Image: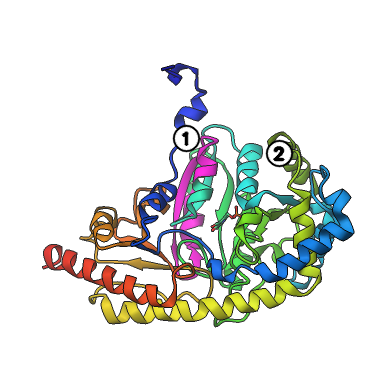
Amino acid sequence: MVNFDHLYSDRASKMRKSEIRELLKVAQDPEVISFAGGLPNPQSFPIQDLKVIVQTVLNNHGKVALQYGTTQGVNELRDEIAERCHKEGMTMGASAENIMITGGSQQALDAIGKVFLNPGDIAIVGLPSYLGGINAFRSYEANLIGVPLDEGGIKLDLLEEKLKDLVKQGMPVKFIYTVPTFSNPAGTVMPESQRKKLIDIAHEYNLVIIEDDPYSKLRYDTSSIKPIKAFDDEGRVIYLSTFSKILAPGFRLAWVIAAEEVMRKLALSKQAQDLCTAPFSQYVAHEFIKSGSMDLHIMRICEMYKPKRDIMMNSMKKYFPEGYICNKPNGGMFAWVTLPEQIDTEVMFLDAIKEKVAYVHGKAFCVDGGGASSMRLNFSYSTNEQIDIGMKRLGAVIERKMSVLCR
Ligand SMILES: Cc1ncc(COP(=O)(O)O)c(C=O)c1O
């Protein structure tokens, strides 16, 4: 057997396993009801629509769709996305030249890490934050500093304090990474006033905002909110969104919007990664939008997920012992639950698995080692019946833990 250890780069040696991927392995037991993954419901996949669309793409665009494409992506798709962005209020800096189609938002996060981060550079993330973002930035050896969230997203007073402090210490920050709308994992939405203030703060400290927005279309109660990018007249915000939650993650299709200068760097980075995103997928996604299927599909997904969210919240009330905190998420796919501080959800995970229910423990999302008594629950993947049964199992696990630890 070859020992490769001395051959790896320093960077590879520091890469960490994704805790979620490891957990998903355990949660794959068919008897386990898993609230752990971030998976869309497979019943929502628009398979019938896609059968027709794929045929249309092959008939109308077969020769280009099956060829290599340009790095930034298929023009028709970028034009369509640009038009939609304008309708959402992104009137500055969201034209086709500023848009690149990527192999999922995860690829864009990696490219951002590659383009902006030297080893040791500081980036700010929320406490808690999306694990895939944390892992992407860590793989470039970033020094990630967390700022707590409340129900309105990242706490801006604490952010300002932190930035001031870091400037004093001569430690400038490169960017702030945020999921401001139905965040993963916390389910929170940053109000418009905070979005504007965040732009002002970024201007004052001359840093970039990475706005990661996979969930804004999955809205169950509230009216839509403009993205942070809509308030950006300087090109400071790099905006990411994805087809993973509004079409299917198997397409591995997303888009990034950035100022032209940044876009040139991101495109160079992508060229080295994969030359281009699969043109065939891009043509299918374009036809999916153009035919009107996507808007209908988003409505259908919301109709499917809203009752799931409600069942989860009701089951929580029914089965969880008093003492937990969970704000009802108005959209997205996740509920964030905090239990009394005596409970460590990472330790409790083993009990949960024995009872055939899974979640992701809060520490996985917190770069400061906090979040120990919290957990993320996904409500999009399981059937309605499974959600109720799974929550009952989880409630019993929590009750037992609390009876021992919180007497
Ligand atoms: C906040 C956030 N960003 C990025 C991603 C990755 O999305 P994609 O499937 O487009 O790579 C996810 C997936 O769950 C996510 O929740």
- The answer to whether residue 322 is left or right of residue 304 is left
Residue located 29% across and 53% down the image: 346
Q: Quadrant of residue 58?
A: bottom right
- The answer to whether residue 314 is left or right of residue 279 is left
Q: Quadrant of residue 48?
A: bottom right
| Quarter of the rendering occupied by the C terminus | bottom left
Assess disc 1: are there few (<14), some (14-19) or many (≥20) residues with their C-alpha within 10 Å of its C-alpha.
some
Q: Which residue is mark 1?
A: 15
In the rendered structure, does residue 34 fall within the stretch colored magenta? no
Q: Quadrant of residue 268?
A: top right
SS at mark 1 in the image: loop
The mark that comes first in sequence, 1 or 2, is 1
Q: Tell me whether the residue at label 1 lies in contact with that at label 2, contact meaning CB atoms closer than 8 angstroms.
A: no
Colour scheme in use: rainbow
Q: Residue 272: x percent and y percent?
A: 71, 34
User: Residue 8 versus residue 325: which sits nearer the camera?
Assistant: 8
Displayed-image quarter of ligand 1: bottom right
Say what amino acid the circle numbered 2 marks.
Asp
Residue located 72% across and 42% down the image: 266
User: Residue 271 versus residue 256: which sits nearer the camera?
Assistant: 271
Q: In the rendered structure, which segment of residues is drawn in magenta? A: 135-164
| Quarter of the rendering occupied by the N terminus | top left
Q: Which residue is mark 2?
A: 274
In the rendered structure, does residue 159 fall within the stretch colored magenta? yes
SS at mark 2 in the image: helix
Say what amino acid the circle numbered 1 marks.
Met
Q: Is residue 55 above or below residue 238?
A: below
Q: Is residue 163 above or below residue 290?
A: above
Q: Which mark is residue 402?
A: none
Residue located 28% across and 74% down the image: 392
